[in-house]
Amino acid sequence: MPVLKQLNERDPVLPVMVDDFVPASERCVNFTHSITAIIQQVESQTGAVQKILDGTDLEVSMLARHTTRTSCQHLEKVVRNTLNLMQDTDVALRAGRRMRVTSYGMYGYALLSSANFIDVSMVNNKYILSGSPFCQAPMILQGNGGYCTLTPRQWTDPADMAYRFSVEFALAAHLSVCRDVTGGRFGFSRVELAYPRPVYGDAYEQVLECPVSFDQEENIYWFEAPGVQDPLPFADARTNAMVLEICEKLLSELNVSGGVAADVRELLVEYVGHFPDLEGVAAELGMHPRALRRRLTNEDTSFRELLRDVRMRLAVEYLRKTELTNEEISCRLGYSDAANFRHAFKRWTGCSPSEYRGMDSSDS
């Protein structure tokens, strides 16, 4: 049974499951493959492996176990340790090139078994969150190529070296993985990046094998993938269907427990009764409202959807576990009157609050 805590000091009536609102940095995900690639690259250049894991509860031997779970907090520590040890080097680019399509587990096999590159782009756009920790990276196809915009998940400031690290790793990994999937029929035509050219800028063109521009508006690469409708070397419809089902499950778990969306939910619950607007939430998270809106879009949601979800979940809990009236519940959920709450609840569930409460009591 999960531990219970009170919703907040202002409204101690309703208990909420702690597990539903674990801080984003502590949520468990499975990014051992990326951490392993970073460690392998650092070891090849310095031999200082364990230093990269300082401040985490991880050991090198643990990363080889499929049962090991890591978190965004682990990834943050690993990146910061690497930057402290190897500042102003191309370590992230080199580590990213170590990634292979099979490094990404079920997400990788979903890419590999896709029928053609059109399907690859669809798998990437929907399921990348389940496999890649650094950047959201939607692909847009145009003819026998297209473009992909990279938005770091954990770091929002282009002046932050961790932001640069995440983009470098993602760029190199994308190139490596897409070449695996297509049998080599993939390449970057040009890259634009939203930060200044680093001292090792020449390494970009060496690793990415294309022209690279810095100080641009966003991080984006254009690519060529001849024959986007041609069958891929390892296409397998049965395997693809099976691994996509697993990816769907992983994505559902991550959408509930990870990303900026989860931080927004957490803040909304803290301010129950007088929910902040998007601008207020963005300020609490230290983000520009436009950046928050973009990050939520990348996670296939919106502030409006999250507010609706929090209200619905809290309404159900209030109706199930308290004797609060509809007027009292509507006030706690930020509605101007009980009628608006009743209409909203019926849209969510198909029944009125009174009907729902009656069904729940008859089930118990």
Image (cartoon, grey):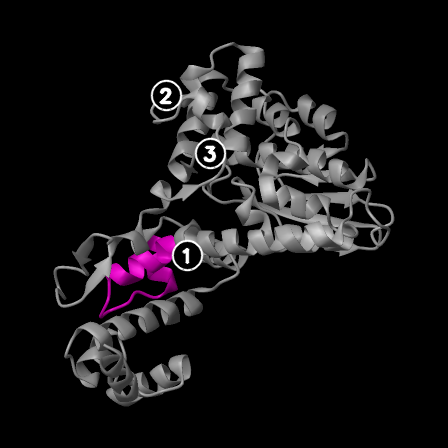
- Which residue is nearer to you in this view: 26 or 45? 26
Residues in magenta, as a range: 262-283
Q: Which residue is mark 3?
A: 160
SS at mark 1 in the image: helix
Query: Could you tell which of marks 2 and 3 lies nearer the N-terminus?
Result: 2
Q: Circle 2 — which element?
A: loop
Q: Residue at x 40, y 79 (%)?
A: 348
- Between label 1 and label 3, give the one nearer the viewer: 1
What is the chief secondary structure element of the magenta stretch?
helix
Name the quadrant of the C terminus. bottom left
Q: Which residue is labeled 2 in the image? A: 54
Q: Which quadrant holds residue 96? A: top right
Under mark 2, the amino acid is Asp
Between 65 and 180, the one nearer to me in the picture: 65
Real-space Cα separation, disc 2 to disc 3, in angstroms: 20 Å
Q: CA distance from mark 1 to mark 3?
A: 28 Å
Q: Is residue 1 left or right of residue 286?
A: left
Q: Is residue 139 above or below residue 69?
A: below
Indicate which disc, 1 or 3, sits on the residue closer to the N terminus.
Answer: 3
Left or right of residue 258: residue 196: right
Residues packed near mark 3 inside 10 Å, few (<14), some (14 to 19) or many (20 plus):
few
